[in-house]
Image (cartoon, grey):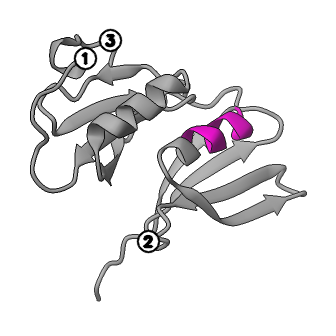
Amino acid sequence: MPTKYLHTMVRVKDLDASIAFYKLLGLEETRRYDSENGRFTLLFMAPPDQPECPVELTYNWDGDDGLPSDSRHFGHLAYRVDNIYEMCQRLMDNGVTINRPPRDGHMAFVRSPDNVSIELLQDGDDLPPAEPWASMGNTGHW
């Protein structure tokens, strides 16, 4: 029996902040489920041309006290981008810290408002090294 990828789920503490972050990455809402009885929202976001590859944002209306707080138990989400320098600049311009800058013109890491590591990979060939990225150091953990 074949296996098919469905989604990656991450818990979020501030749904609006998380939606804004993933929109900066170019994702859009594809589906939403609000459970009055369960008191949670499941919101799916995906790249416009890949609705079959969503991230599921799980928001518990009453908070997540007692749940794991490190948000690091799964690794990271990865997205391919057309221009890694432009994407990183867009994120920085909107207050996102670039934890691992794209010094090599190929790969960068950032974190969502909920501490989820996001890997950004350059589509196609690596871009030539460029400033400010080439001399920018790592910040925090990624």
- Residue 22 magenta-highlighted: no
The kind of residue tagged 2 is Asp
The kind of residue tagged 1 is Pro
Q: Is residue 121 above or below residue 47?
A: above
The kind of residue tagged 3 is Thr
Question: What span is colored magenta in the figure?
Answer: 14-21
Q: Nearer the viewer, mark 2 or mark 1?
A: 1
Q: Nearer the viewer, mark 1 or mark 3?
A: 1
**Position of residue 95 measured from the top left corner of the image (x, y, whole percent):** 54, 21
Relative side of 79 to 39, left or right? left
Question: Label 2 belongs to which residue?
Answer: 49
Q: Secondary structure at mark 2?
A: loop
CA gap, disc 1 and disc 3: 14 Å
Q: Residue at x 28, y 45 (%)?
A: 83
Q: Is residue 35 above or below residue 77?
A: below
Q: Magenta stretch: dominant SS?
A: helix
Q: Residue at x 31, y 31 (%)?
A: 109
CA gap, disc 2 and disc 1: 30 Å
The crowd level at tag 1 (other Cα within 10 Å; few <14, some 14-19, many 20+) is: few
Q: Residue at x 45, y 24 (%)?
A: 92
Question: Label 3 belongs to which residue?
Answer: 139
**Position of residue 122 measured from the top left corner of the image (x, y, whole percent):** 22, 47
Which of 116/17 is in front? 17
